[in-house]
Amino acid sequence: MSPVLPPFSQPITLLGGGEVDHETLAEALLLAPVIVAADGGANVAWAHGHSPEWVVGDLDSADRRKLADMPPERVLFVAEQETTDFEKCLQRLDAPFVLGLGFTGPRFDHSLSACNALARNPARACLLLGRQDVIFHAPARLALDLDPGTRVSLFPMAEVTGRSDGLRWPIAGLTLSPGGRIGTSNEAMGRVEMEFDGAGMLVIL
């Protein structure tokens, strides 16, 4: 049986091993106070003076000495190598929502793999937070109260059609796909409402 985590009643701040600045982490913890670390994300938590509630992954990056100080039942070893540590966590987290930090940044391949994990797990409510971007998989319908001029990029990870209200360049009648038309650098006119006919659309703000 695949290792599982218990359900969480509170939102989760999920930490990866990439860049995480103190201010963004502090803001995330105001909204999602429980820290779960994806393997090397435990090192990030400890470096910022926090202790993760759980560490999940193949455990090839987390500090072994500090792992040994954690209750063993809070360290979840997942041996398979078909998924990243981020996706291992995403597949197992049952929480109101997840804020992911340390999964985007200088390593572009890591950023791409995180986006791929969002697309492969569309039912998980997860926002990836970076220095410049918030990235999430769009639900079938969403409404965003945005300031006019806010960048709204749409990147399809599969062929997707949909409709929009409040975007400078509406998407109705368009077919968006990873090898075809994409929606980089659209712009909010104010409140934005969108709906999509299938899974696979990433929203980047």
Image (cartoon, rainbow, N blue to C red):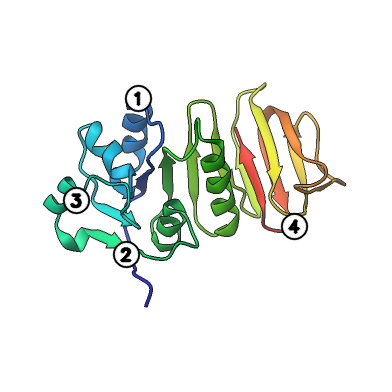
Please tell me which residue is depicted at 32% across the width and 52% down the height of the picture. Answer: 60
Q: Decide if residue 130 is on the left or right side of residue 193.
A: left
Element class at badge 4: loop
What's the mark number on residue 5?
2
Q: Residues within 10 Å of mark 2 (few under 14, many from 20)?
A: some
Q: Earlier in the sequence, mark 1 or mark 3?
A: 1
| Cα–Cα gap, marks 2 and 1 | 28 Å
**CB of mark 4 within 8 Å of CB of mark 1?**
no
Q: Nearer the viewer, mark 4 or mark 2?
A: 2
Q: Earlier in the sequence, mark 2 or mark 1?
A: 2
Nearer the N terminus, badge 2 or badge 3?
Answer: 2
Q: Earlier in the sequence, mark 4 or mark 1?
A: 1
Q: CA distance from mark 4 to mark 1?
A: 37 Å
Q: Secondary structure at mark 2?
A: loop
Query: Is 107 left or right of 140, judged from the image as shown?
Result: left
Task: Give the residue number, with chain letter if any, for mark 4.
Answer: 197
Question: Residue visible at 48% across and 26% down?
Answer: 131
Q: What's the residue type where badge 3 is placed?
A: Leu
- Quarter of the image where one finds residue 205: top right
Q: Which residue, given by chain and number where applicable, does mark 3 sit on? A: 67
Q: Secondary structure at mark 3?
A: helix
Is residue 125 toward the left or the right of residue 10 in the image? right
Give the amino acid at mark 4.
Answer: Asp
Tell me the distance, in whole angstroms, between the alpha carbons under discs 2 and 3.
17 Å
In this rendering, the answer to whether 108 lies above or below 57 is above
Give the spatial CA distance, label 1 vs label 3. 25 Å
Q: Rounded to the nearest whole Å, what is the CA distance between mark 4 and mark 3?
A: 44 Å
Q: Nearer the viewer, mark 2 or mark 3?
A: 3
